[in-house]
Each structure stands twice: as structure tokens, then as C-alpha cells.
Amino acid sequence: MLKVVFEREDVQRVRLAGQADPMWELVLGLQKAQTDELPAPFAGWRQEIAGRVSGRSVESLRLLQTMVRATGGFPDFLTPFQRVSSIAEGCDTFLATPPDRLSGDLAVTFADRTPSSWVQGLARGERRHVHATANAIHTMYEALISPYWPQVTELVTHEWSRQTRNLAEQGVGGVLGSLPGVLSWDGRVLRTSYPLEKTVHLAGRGLVLLPSHFCWGSPVTWIDPGLPPVLVYQAPGDRAVRADGLKLPSHLVPLLGRTRAECLRLLLVPLTTTELAERLGVSLGAASKQAGVLSTSGLVSSARRGKSVVHQATSLGIALFAGRPTGY
């Protein structure tokens, strides 16, 4: 669990990031490229990148995967605290990373494993290793993220607009309490799902909320609690990184019927009843009924967040959509 402790002034200093960050999207995309239990909306994306990563880019992928595994922490210098709007700017920021930051971040990342000789050279700030890493960052961004950047920015911009409305209607507490992955918000401490126990004291520094396309499930933050606080979270919405990646599978309509199958497809990402009704083109009552039937079947979970009910496909629902065996 992640605990973010607010002081009174921190609530007034919560800020919404309105642009996608290419470095965060790359690192989180690298994790998705390696995970065994890939969320269904990213299946088409991974099929495409498998055919795109070849030749010299394979070595770039291996290089970055030594630092970014499918799960767990990664060096903070790969996601600079200075906001960047392009991968070129991100690479320049990385190249300017002080040697003590390189060594410190890598020491924490490899605390439970032995770093390779190449990682040790990067930790020493050796020019050859630093520039090879910058080249790998650029190469993998072009392969994994760049072709989908318009969809990434559209999703994040939509989320910024949505949260801006929420801020006006419900205040900061309403925004914080409704973030995907948040377990509770009591006005002082924000608790979220997280792979380990971690506490971040904002201490008057405020908090930047950064929606992300490739973040999924638990929010993410930096390893170093001394960096300017940021919470990267899953931007709700369709992840249409591949036009046919989210089409209804042929096996699903005969099982559920077209409307209910479409409902399950949409709920591969969390949606409120209102959002679900809008996307299905049905009334609120009809959308609630469809989600209720899927919930009764164990394919969807529904939970109240503030004044809204949020629905999302369960692991069983995702497995059914993807046509994968569930193990029981």
C-alpha cells in the first residue's frame, strides 16, 4: 500500500497534469511489453510491437530491460522530475543527469540483485554507457510509443478535462477519492494499491496528478520520496492503440449477446454508469442493468466512488474477452 500524507497546504497545491509525459509512457510501456498477465486492452499493441522490435532495436530493448523489469521499481532518472513534452527533450534531460543521481538510483534499483558490468559503468557515469542509454531510450520510444502517441495524448487530454470538471463540481477530495487504484481518502492520507509498503510525506510540496495511458491498476510514483511529488495513475477510457485490438472477439457475441458483449469490452477500463451509457448509446437504467448482469456473473465488479458507481471487468471477464483459460 502507498500512503500519501497531506498537510493542510498540500490540498491547495494539488495540480492536474494536462499533457502526457513521453518518458513515463515509455517506461510503463516497457513493463507492459514484458508482463505475463497483460491486460486485454494492450494485447493488440504488444502483437504489433513484437513485429517492430528487430535488428538494433533488440539490443536497445535488452539494455533498458536490465533496469526496467515487468514489475518492481526502476531508476528515477528514466522519468525525470522536470516535465518533458518530447522524447528528444527527455533524452537531453537524461544526458544532463548528475553522476551521483545515476549511481544513487541504480544502487536502489539493484539493491536485491547484482548489477551487470554495463550497469556498473552507467552508475559510474561513463560517457559511452550514458549515451548508449540515451540512444536506447530514443530507439524504444520510436518502436513502442511513437506510432500510438496521438491516441495517448488524446486519452490523457480527455482525462484532464474530466478531472477539471470533477474539481469544479466535487473539489480536490472528490478528485483524489475517485482516482483509479485509490483505496481511501480521509482528508489527510491518500491510500492506494501499491506493490509494497511506502509512505510519502508531501510536507507542503503539493502533488502533481499525472494520468497515463500505459499505467494500469496501481498508481506509480518515484522511488525517492525527496523528489517533487507525483502520482501517475491509469487514465480511464478506451485504449485504442490498435484499431482492431478492442473489437469484439467472435466467440463473445454468441455467449453474451451483442450489447452485453460490447458492455464487457468497454469495461476493460473503469467507467462510471454515465460514461458506460454514453458509449453504449443507451439510457442510464439500461447501462446499469447490463453492468449488473455482468457483475452477477462475476465478469464485472462495481463499486461506489463518491456520487458515482464505477464498473470494471474482473480478471474472469478479461480472460473471457481474451479467450484465455482461467485455470478453474
Image (cartoon, rainbow, N blue to C red):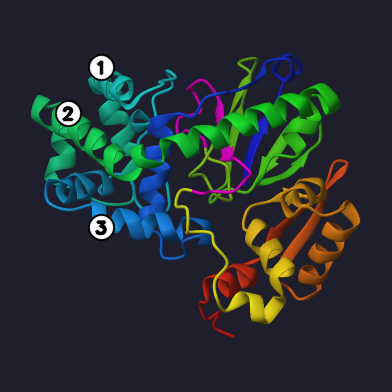
Counting residues from the N terminus, which is met first, the one under dot 2 or under dot 1? 1
Marks 2,1: beta carbons within 8 A: no
Determine the CA span between mark 3 and mark 1: 33 Å
Residue that extends furthest to the bottom in the rendered view of this protein: 328
Instruction: Give the residue type at disc 3.
Output: Gly
Determine the CA span between mark 2 and mark 1: 10 Å
User: What's the mark number on residue 51?
Assistant: 3
Residue, disc 2: 130
The boundaries of the magenta stretch are 221-240
Determine the CA span between mark 3 and mark 2: 27 Å
**Residue 74 appears in the picture as rendered:** no
Label 2 neighbour load within 10 Å: few <14, some 14-19, many 20+: many
Tell me if residue 52 comes above or below residue 36 in the rendering. above
User: What's the mark number on residue 96?
Assistant: 1
> At 65% from the left edge and 75% from the top edge, which residue is drawn?
253
Instruction: Give the residue type at disc 1.
Output: Ala
